[in-house]
Image (cartoon, rainbow, N blue to C red):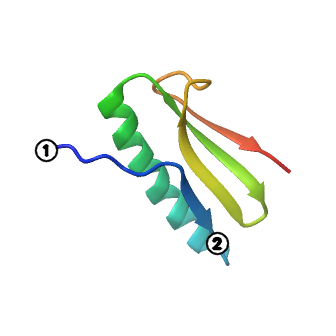
Amino acid sequence: MQTTIDLPITVTATDRSSMERQLDAAVEAALSQAMHEGRQGILVTQHDHASFTVDLSDAVPFGLTREHQEW
């Protein structure tokens, strides 16, 4: 049985290794959801030096992950 993930996923990091671990986990969760739905790509948005969101987006083609800086 496939479970759905609540998106977007917010990542707030205090150090680089924590940021990388949390972002990797968030992208993996979003990828699982994207593969299940088969129509959206993954958008990782950086809001400031330590704050990110990971979400599915119609603006990103299925199978791709894009990064966007909002600051």
The numbered mark, 1 or 2, whose residue comes first in the sequence reads 1
Decide: is 20 above or below 8.
Answer: below
Disc 1 marks a residue whose amino acid type is: Met
Image point (47%, 23%), residue name: 62
63 displayed left or right of 44: left
Residue position for label 1: 1
x, y percent for residue 47 = 76, 55
Classify 10 Å Cα crowding around label 2: few (below 14), some (14-19), many (20 and above): some
Disc 2 marks a residue whose amino acid type is: Ala
Q: Return the mark for residue 13.
A: 2
Q: Nearer the viewer, residue 62 or 3?
A: 3
Q: Quadrant of the N terminus?
A: top left
Instruction: Kindly report which numbered mark, 1 or 2, lies closer to the viewer in this rendering.
Output: 1
Classify 10 Å Cα crowding around label 1: few (below 14), some (14-19), many (20 and above): few
Q: Secondary structure at mark 2?
A: loop
Q: Quadrant of residue 60?
A: top right
Q: CA distance from mark 1 to mark 2?
A: 32 Å
